[in-house]
Image: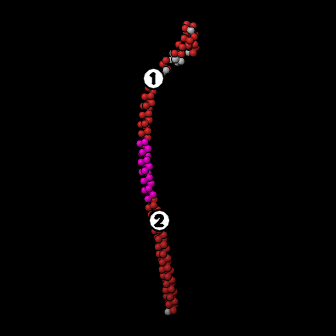
Amino acid sequence: MSPTEHERHELFLALERALGTEPARALMEQLPPRRWDDLATREDLRAIDREFVRIGQRFDAVDQRFEKIDQRFEHLDQRFDRIEGRMDVVEQHLVRIDERFVSLENRLLAEFRHEIITQNRLLFFSMVGAIFTAASLAFAAVRF
């Protein structure tokens, strides 16, 4: 257990009475301000240095892993870029297909209109012909 400031002061006073002021001061300066086991030795500093080296190596390993992950992400980005390029081509094809469907729809509508108009004309003239035929027959029947 480390001595308190009061105990250190009492020790200094006892040494001062026994040895005198200067030798007591010199002796007290040789005592650590704390417990001896609280002081770091060179070996403690070397151990800390080795620990920092190990920590540095672990960080290097983590950095290498992050570099691998970055490479994987770059690879994925390249793949996504290629997929995006393919999707652009697919989109262009779909736009062309959509345009062809619109064109086909317009051609079919035009053809249907033409056929309906043609059938309506045929029906109209057939009806007119039938009415004239019926009227002619009625006049002929009334005349005879």
As rendered, which of 22 and 29 lies closer to the eye? 22
Looking at the image, residue 59 lies above or below residue 3:
below
Which mark, by number, is residue 42? 1
Q: Nearer the viewer, residue 140 or 33?
A: 33
Q: Which residues are magenta?
A: 67-90
Q: Can you tell which mark lies on residue 85?
A: none
SS assignment at label 1: helix
Whether 80 is among the magenta residues is yes
The residue sitting at 44% across, 49% down in the picture is 77
What is the x, y in percent for residue 52?
Answer: 45, 30
Report the Cα–Cα distance between label 1 and label 2. 83 Å
Residue 2 seen in render: no
In the rendered structure, find residue 99 and report the number of the disc placed on it: 2
Q: Is residue 30 magenta?
A: no
The earlier-in-sequence mark between 1 and 2 is: 1
Q: What's the residue at 50%, 88% (across, down)?
A: 136
Q: Quadrant of residue 86?
A: bottom left
138 or 76, which lies in front? 76
